[in-house]
Amino acid sequence: MVTGLSLDDLFAELRHRKWTLYLFGRPAAPDLYAATFRWPACTDVLIIRDERRATAYRTPSFPGTDVFRPSVVSWQYGAEPLWTLRAVLTIGAPGQADAPFQVLAPAPGSGVPLEMGQPVMIRPTGLVQDPTPKTAR
């Protein structure tokens, strides 16, 4: 559970869960921070625009898909970074009963603008990506 945690705690949780971090713009002063978690058929995306605005969504990730400019999403959220990070860390894993499965048009401006180009820096936070809890046998 991620309630009651600070923004720093939630960023630590992103790293613990092996999300990949991206910077758009100049490395010394990025315009956007983004993070992704790739599942077999979809990707969870977090985009922090500034200290007051962030967006998150889950989008299908087929070959050739640009997850930063989705054409459809199955879940989306936008608010302050703290609340957006909490939201994206609590959605159900694909295939679980609480996982979103709708087909929605992404909210205007939810992705990375085309003029931002590709990320200038990518930092994988680990090699294994499986945040689903393991059940004891």
Image: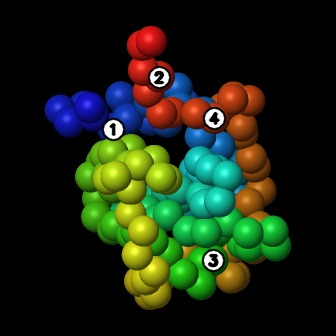
Q: Secondary structure at mark 1?
A: helix
Which badge, 1 or 4, comes first in the chain's sequence? Answer: 1
Query: Which amino acid type corresponds to the residue marked 1 in the rendered image?
Result: Leu
Element carrying mark 4: loop
Residue 93, given in percent of the width and then of the height, sits at 45, 47
> Residue 129 or 24: which is nearer the viewer?
129
C-alpha distance separating marks 1 and 4: 21 Å
Q: Earlier in the sequence, mark 2 or mark 4?
A: 4
Which of the labelled discs sits on residue 69, or is there none? 3
Point out residue 62 in the picture as x, y percentages from the top left corner.
73, 69
For disc 1, the neighbor class at 10 Å (few under 14, some 14 to 19, many from 20) is: some
Indicate the quadrant where residue 68 lies. Answer: bottom right
Name the residue beneath numbered marker 4. Answer: 129
Identified at 72% across, 39% down, the residue is 123
Q: CA distance from mark 3 to mark 1?
A: 25 Å
Q: Residue at x 74, y 30 (%)?
A: 127
Which quarter of the rendered picture does the C terminus lie within?
top left
Q: Residue at x 28, y 64 (%)?
A: 79
> Alpha-carbon distance for marks 2 and 3?
32 Å
**x, y (%) of residue 106?**
46, 82
Give me the C-alpha separation between circle 4 and circle 3.
22 Å
Point out which mark residue 7 bears: 1
Q: As shown in the figure, which amino acid type bears the numbered disc 3? A: Arg
Q: Secondary structure at mark 2?
A: loop
Camera-nearest label, 1 or 2: 2
Earlier residue among tags 2 and 3: 3
Disc 2 target residue: 134
